[in-house]
Amino acid sequence: MPFDVAIVGGGLAGITAALELLEHDLSIVIIDRDSEQNFGGLAVESLGGMLLVDTPIQRLNRVKDSPEAALRDWYSFAQFTEQDTWPKKWAELYVNRSVDDIYNWLKPRGIRFFPIPHWVERGESGEGNSLPRYHIVWGTGRRLMQRLSDDLRHHPRANNLEYLFEHRVEELLLHGGAVVGVHGRSETTGQAFEIEAGAVLVASGGINGDIERVKREWDRSWGPAPEHILNGAHRYADGTLHDAVTSIGGEVSKLYQMWNYAAGIHHPTPRIPGEGLGLIPPKSALWLDATGKRFGPTPLVTGFDTHLLCKRIAMSKHGYSWQVMNWKIALKEIAVSGADSNPAFRDRSILRLARDIFLGNHELLQYLVDECEDVVVADSLEELVAGMNRLNAASEAVGGGHVVLDNVLQAVAHYDAQIELGKAGFDEQLERIQRVRQWRGDRSRTCKLQRIMDQKATPLVAFREFIVSRKSMGGIQTDLQSRVLSNTGEPISGLYAAGEAAGFGGGGICGLKSLEGTFISNCILNARMAVRSMTGQPLTP
């Protein structure tokens, strides 16, 4: 039976497109490789952060933003080339439409944001976000996806929509130069299937769930990929549809551009091999290489340039790192990205959030200490370093490395001495801490120049951290109607792409680096632009 539209992928982009298509009384099928119980994809597990420009929440916090300022910041991080025609156009569209097409689309659906925007990706040298723009869904990605999934299932035209779970699309069907359907196989039985459709929307995610492919596509200007990379992406994000698009002459660009996390730890209960948790690393911890030397001369500090953190760690000899801190720092600053690791946000509990801010997140820290293999706790630096080396000796796969006690002693002594000197001392990490504490969204989650060797703040804690594969920033090239472009630059009739599969727009809307929060929000924008194109609806002013 032919459908008006076949959507490949049941994540945020696919669900958004289905909701919009139902408004036009079209027949739709969603084909997803995962089971029905996992409907919604990786967005369900996300923190739910979105970069939004000139919102009522920003104005409430006296933040004066504008599309012009946001685009200037975007370009400073993206470092676009002359060939990045469509990514540039998508970036301009995004900063001008984020409120109308994302914020205002979500609000009537019961989606609210935390009342204080966060300030991330500030840039190490004045580039990056010049203002706080990171809006976190109150309820995280779990609530976002629950509300949208419920809207889909209870839509007045829900009978127009069919689901095909546990089915893998492998090929795009062509007739007369146009895409007219898909071909694939059942994930459970291997039986082949074909579906005819007037249009096909590829919303199948990126490549970062396949670690071997991540290593093959690795940015060679960084040197070889680290031996040990953790998996923080969806298990079915393996680039199958990227290859299918390429095979019919579609253009796929810059898969080496990725948004990975610098501070990953092994998941205590992994669902897939090598699954990692992405820490939101403490700003007050010392970031050390595999030998215990502090990264320098510019220290590593989170919240300024995640891409550069990953690059510097990946280019170090052993490709992983340590963070050393004390219990007080860990309690106040340690966090893990994702819905399940942030129950206060996930469950929309103001009381629990206030408790965690003022008293520290005891529950999360104790869980990591008790269950995660990458955490060491000790009462002295000598004991801590001995524990770090025992951990490495038991983990041959991490790429070697031996922590030298003198390196750690020297790094800690220098850092603590600078704090003792107060205004007379200088350390770039301390200067950044003072800077971020000027914004109230950061002040409540950042210690005030806390020494490592402080008897009132013991025991000492060390986290062994790896690169976590997360998101593909390159992808299938699309125009502003989300139409897939051929390798000659012309739209392929009947074929569209949205979300991570499309590099979140244009084959790489973020360019080299993301201002953060440009991922799940672009799944919404890309999908809505695709439906406008399919249905012949002009973009509203």
Image: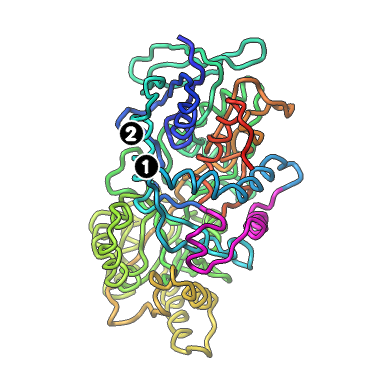
Magenta region includes residue 57: yes
Q: Outermost residue toward the right?
A: 82
Amino acid of disc 1? Val
Whether residue 228 is visible here, answered yes or no, is: no
The quarter in which the C terminus is drawn is top right
Residue 368 or 16: which is nearer the viewer?
16
> Where is mark 1, residue-wise?
44
Asked if residue 336 can be seen in this view, the reply is: yes
Quarter location, residue 87: top right
What residue is rendered at 29% in x and 66% in y?
A: 356
Q: What is the x, y in percent for residue 481? A: 63, 33
Q: CA distance from mark 2 to mark 1?
A: 9 Å
**Residue at the image point whose x is 53% and y is 26% from the top:** 201
> Percent position (x, y) of residue 90?
64, 43
The amino acid at mark 2 is: Asn
Q: Residue at x 31, y 52 (%)?
A: 346
- The residue nearer to you, when weighing 386 against 188, is 188
Q: Which residue is the site of mark 2?
A: 38
Q: Is residue 104 above or below residue 426?
A: above
Nearer the N terminus, badge 2 or badge 1? 2
| Residue 385: percent from left, percent from top | 35, 68
Span highlighted in magenta in the image: 51-80
Please say if the residues under marks 2 and 1 sit with CB atoms less than 8 Å apart. yes
In the rendered view, tell whether residue 55 sits above or below residue 288: above
Depicted 173 relative to depicted 259: above or below: above
